[in-house]
Amino acid sequence: MHPASFGYEAPASLEEVFGLLRQHGEDAKLLAGGHSLLPAMKLRLTQPEVLIDLGRIPGLSGIRQDGDTLIIGALTTHTEVSASETVRNLLPGLADTASVIGDLQVRNRGTMGGSVAHADPGADLPVTLTALNASFMLTSAEGGRTVAADDFFVDFFTTALEPHEILTAIHIPLPAAPTRTSYAKLPHPASGYVVVSAAAALTLDGSGACTGARVVLGGVGGTPHRATGTETALNGQALTPEVIAAAAERAADGIDPHADSYADEEYKRHMAAVYARRAIEAAAARA
């Protein structure tokens, strides 16, 4: 398949990008890594008249710690995240997630911001970033605003991004108390695409009891799903195998998993419990 004809712009600054967005409006699409947009264009699911390539704009990539916040530029690739010693030391669950996205080609070219802004319900990163209580820096010609992950993902392929805004950075708070993170997914055997996934961020006290939990499911609906029943069941408890298993059984409480070509609702509901348990066990086992 070949995409429809389109124009191409490679601005060197955000100011140029905002000017092009004003000029072309809804006829333009932003290009980051391209591993979601270009296949859609080849299938003619989207036919932008102009692509605005963000790759030449300085300051949109990189990983740095600023006090109690980890800041990741939107154009940082998945490979850079998975290989980062900073990420591996502070948030190993995020490194785990980046290391299993797509294949090597996708990880080398695909970007954090591109994946988040695309908001594919089967994507890996939105699940983990929601579990990590991340927030997203959205920038426009008028200034910037920060939107929490819990509020950013609205529906299938839909986010809180306005047409004139660009996602420029991801901010992840670094907890003061010991917190363990992990990610587990059931991939489709042919495509590697998520069937069901789960991310866990568990805060423990000195005795090993869970004082805070964020457990999030992917692949079960249009957005990452907070497994609040599981979180409640873990809080205040020592993370014994029995406690983890009972909490994981509540992972799909209150939702009707979205059936797709990979799995029906019943199977996804069962796998939600299985992968919530695996994510929690992996996080609990981390030193």
Image: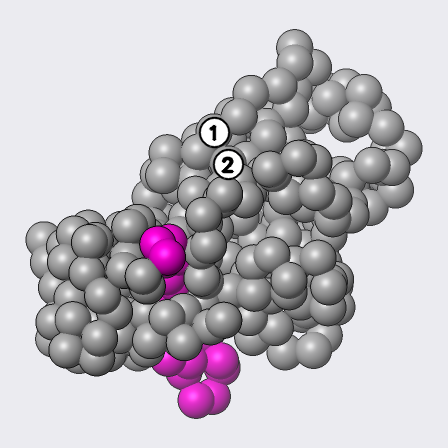
Question: What percent of the width, then of the height, locates residue 183?
Answer: 44, 69
Q: Residue type at mark 2? A: Ser
Question: What percent of the width, then of the height, locates residue 50?
Answer: 72, 38
Compared with 69, 269 (above or below) is below
Name the colour scheme: one colour
- Disc 1 is placed on an element classified as strand
Q: Quadrant of residue 83?
A: bottom right
Q: Would residue 7 be seen by someone viewing this image from the given angle?
A: no
Q: Earlier in the sequence, mark 1 or mark 2?
A: 2
Q: On the image, numbered disc 1 is attached to which residue?
A: 147
Q: Nearer the viewer, residue 194 or 171?
A: 171
Question: What percent of the width, then of the height, locates residue 197?
Answer: 36, 69
Please indicate whether residue 163 sits to the left or right of residue 153 in the image: right
Q: Locate the N terminus and report the quarter of the image it occupies.
A: bottom right
Q: For the view shown, which residue lies furthest in the front direction? A: 207
Compared with 17, 202 (above or below) is below
Which mark is drawn over residue 135? 2
Q: State yes or no: residue 57 in magenta.
A: no
Task: Give the magenta range.
Answer: 186-206
Q: Would residue 193 be seen by someone viewing this image from the given angle?
A: yes
Please indicate whether residue 219 sits to the left or right of residue 286 in the image: left
Number of labels in the image equals 2
Q: Residue at x 86, y 28 (%)?
A: 13
Please indicate whether residue 77 sits to the left or right of residue 116 in the image: right
Q: State yes or no: residue 203 in magenta.
A: yes
